[in-house]
Image (cartoon, rainbow, N blue to C red):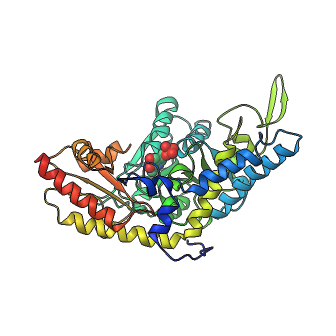
Amino acid sequence: MLHPEPVQKVWDPNVIRSDFPLIAGLSGIYLDNAASAQKPRCVMDSMTDGAFTRYANVHRGAHRLSGLATASYEGARARLQSFLNAPGAEQIIFTKSATEAINLVASAFAAIVAPGDEIVVSSLDHHANLVPWHLLRERHGIVLRWVDPDAFGNLDPTAFADAITPRTRLVAVTHMSNVFGVLTPLEAIVRLAHEKGVPVLADGTQAVVHHAIDVSALDVDFYALTGHKLYGPTGIGALYAKPGWLERMPPMLGGGEMVATFGRDHVEYAAAPHKFEAGTPPILEAIGLVAALDYVEGVGRTTIATHEAALGRHARARFAAIPNITVFGDAEKPGPILTFASAGAHANDIAAILDAKGICVRAGAHCTQPLHQMLGFSSTCRASFAMYSTLDEVDALADAVEEALAILK
Ligand SMILES: Cc1ncc(COP(=O)(O)O)c(C=O)c1O
């Protein structure tokens, strides 16, 4: 599943940190990367450069600048195609977020499903890959069939196969939990679902940040991602759809630049991907996303994953020595996300004390209420690492959590 590394650089966290102005200038510690990652300077520079040298609206103008902007925007699509190893650039639709990408598929399935049809979902998933299917339940009478992870957050692919019935129209599942930071067995889920003729949508929002993704090898039908967690700008996400799907799917939004022929009583849509990109798309954000993808591959996907795994292992080792704390997930699979809670202290209070010490973590249910119901905590703390996080920061976190629990006991 791994692409060859385009450039091999010597790993040096200080060099990496100096590429991220906010991180370099921060007096505290940023460990809320699963919510949104900080941006390397090259991302913002590329957007400024795009705005100042080749900006106009895309696909519309008869003039040179529009041609340049269109080339940048379509170039970004081709860049994302290669980043994901998608078979064609036209299989990539730009959206404003992963949330919008998943809703786009849900809106298309609204036209396909009949009352009583089923969609298999997992209680490991983020609300972004649950609420769109709830909307279909409310509005179109579909039935949600739930697959639960085990107590350590592991999903069993055969549970998905068992949940599939002749009425199943789709399996929707995350490729990486935003609570545990561990990859799900997506390849096996896809294989078993396809054996029963059921397509699979994967929420790749977290997975694509930490691992090289090959949508062709995964054979997944839909793959959603968001730019801002991938060190890119906000306001851009993407949907990959396997060849064959987009032709059959109706657009979600109507508007400019998505129509082939227009009549008073008749409209014919443009071919994909333009059919799904009504209105002015995220032009500068696409340029910024390319810079983020180049940066991530330039550092090296394996290099980043190795560093983040070391952070995860160290965090688990340090937290294992803290009394009265529950660390969630599989200790055998330390990921770049560490979620923890204490029966004796509210997660919000722990996070507030950490914040007072300059450490940014997230507290709450992290948009995973079904999972938190299973964990038995309505609120947990989540520390999430990035390529610029360091072992010293993990130590500072562990020390601060220990102090917070001593204060709150
Ligand atoms: C697993 C997962 N899926 C989807 C999303 C939604 O991403 P966005 O808000 O960028 O659409 C998130 C964001 O936290 C996430 O962690």
Which quadrant of the figure contains the N terminus? bottom right
Q: Is residue 10 left or right of residue 371?
A: right
- Pick out the residue farthest to the left: 409
Q: Is residue 165 left or right of residue 367?
A: right
**Residue 80 seen in this snapshot:** yes
The residue sitting at 55% across, 40% down in the picture is 103
The residue sitting at 87% across, 45% down in the picture is 64
Q: Is residue 262 left or right of residue 364?
A: right
- Pick out the residue farthest to the right: 62
Rendered location of residue 342, percent (x, y): 18, 51
Using the image, determine if residue 60 lies above or below residue 32.
above
Rendered location of residue 239, percent (x, y): 61, 50
Q: Which quadrant of the figure has residue 152?
A: bottom left
**Residue 93 seen in this snapshot:** no
Task: Choose between 342 and 200: the one closer to the eye.
Answer: 342
Rendered location of residue 28, percent (x, y): 35, 53
The residue sitting at 73% across, 53% down in the picture is 90
Q: Which quadrant of the figure has residue 96?
A: top right
Q: Is residue 346 left or right of residue 291?
A: left
Task: Choose between 167 and 269: the one closer to the eye.
Answer: 269
The residue sitting at 79% across, 52% down in the picture is 71
- Pick out the residue farthest to the top: 264
Rendered location of residue 54, percent (x, y): 77, 47
Q: How many marks?
A: 0
